[in-house]
Amino acid sequence: MSSDIAKTPGVKALAKNFHKFGTELILKSKGPEENAVFSSYSISNVLCMTSLGAKGDTYEQLKHALNLPEDVESLKSTYSDITSLTKSDENVCLEVANSIFPSNKLKVCDEYLEDVVKCFGSEVQSLDYTKNEEARNSINEWVSKNTNDKIPELFEKGTIEVDTSNILVNAIYFKNDWASKFDPTLTTEKEFHVTPDKIVTVPTMFAPKLKFATKSVDLLKCTIAAIPFKGERIVMYLLVPKEPFGLPELEAKLVSEEFDPTILEKASNSVHSLIQLPKFKLESTHDLVEACNSLGIEDLFDPKADLSGIGGEPGGLFVSKIVQKAVIEVSEEGSEAASASGIIAVVESAIFSDPFVVDHPFVFMIKDKATGMILMSGRVVDPSL
């Protein structure tokens, strides 16, 4: 079923739309000089989940921003399949945790509860926000549990008000070994060019007996390298600008209509090269209300919002906060992330010259071949931070 799901027009369209939406959000919420990690899949999940309870202009704004299909039942069915696939592979340690935390003053509709559990594998938990610290602790405990304790505190003390109406939270946890690991004894300190005026020295991984698929993509003015994880269902793609400081131009192309996530697979059918890749660990927290507003999602965060499909009357419920925190660590063993078709080439005995060196700011994407979804993405501007 997985290969069929990933190739269906509906899923391919969702994958492209969610990536574009998520990348636009990250560009609006973080400056181009900052490291960032983000899950467009996870944030799109929770907003789609909200859209099932939205009506009127509130729904239309979500539908337009996410470019959702006209047929809501088709969306439910597709998401149900995607959710089941995400959890069905023993080689994949992936946890996507989405939840809506409305005030306990609201009676949530049974039909809505049934939809979000069945289609999104998600939860709705009512909280008493008049006891705001207890509510904060409850949300943090839920996130910590669903990210293997990698994100123990999403909300800091004093960040949740007693008059909170509703909070959307999404977190993602991913851990997997590379299909073939880098040799840690060969990791050495090498230069990384952050800006024309700043060079840092960082631990850089190398595997002289392994070659990975790489492809030059003129449309994006970058080289794409594919590094598969164990089981080869999930792949990390490195998008490295051909110009040392061409990251802003590359990111602009990634949110244009020119970019299609299926272009990533072409790297898997290309020449194979040795790779030198810096180790990195990124952590980002995104308060996304302002960024969502800039993309046309406005009523959702206004007391006039119509979320009566979740419960209550129009204007009785709106979203106070929408927050994502993501963490990723890439090392010789593989990747561990909280917040992914490539084939490893033949292992050879000789040491090859002229490796593909990642020594200036780049973008990464972790893609699930089974669903076609980009699970996490980010930019590495300075791996020494």
Image (tube, grey):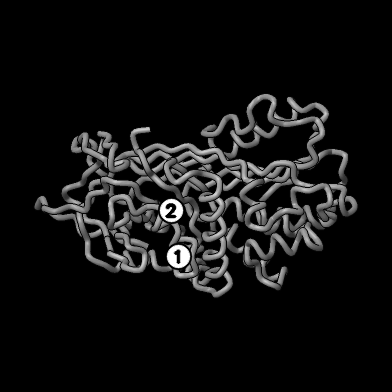
Instruction: State the separation of the CA atoms marked 2 and 1.
Output: 11 Å
Q: Residue furthest left?
A: 350
Q: Amino acid at mark 2?
A: Ile
Q: Residues within 10 Å of mark 2 (few under 14, many from 20)?
A: many
Q: Amino acid at mark 1?
A: Pro
Residue drawn at the location 11% of the way across and 53% of the way down: 353
Q: Where the C terminus falls, by quadrant?
A: top left
Q: Residue 155's quadrant in the figure?
A: top right
234 left or right of 70 in image: left
13 left or right of 281 in image: right
For mark 2, give the secondary structure.
strand
Residue drawn at the location 82% of the way across and 39% of the way down: 103
Disc number lying in front (2 or 1): 1
Residue 197's x, y, as percent? Answer: 28, 38
Point out the tag, 2 or 1, that comes first from the N-terminus. Answer: 1
Q: Residue furthest bottom?
A: 9
Q: Can you identify the residue that label 2 sits on? A: 366
Q: Can you identify the residue that label 1 sits on? A: 261
For mark 1, give the secondary structure.
helix
Residue drawn at the location 22% of the way across and 49% of the way down: 357
Residue 165 seen in this snapshot: yes
Residue 17's x, y, as percent? Answer: 56, 64
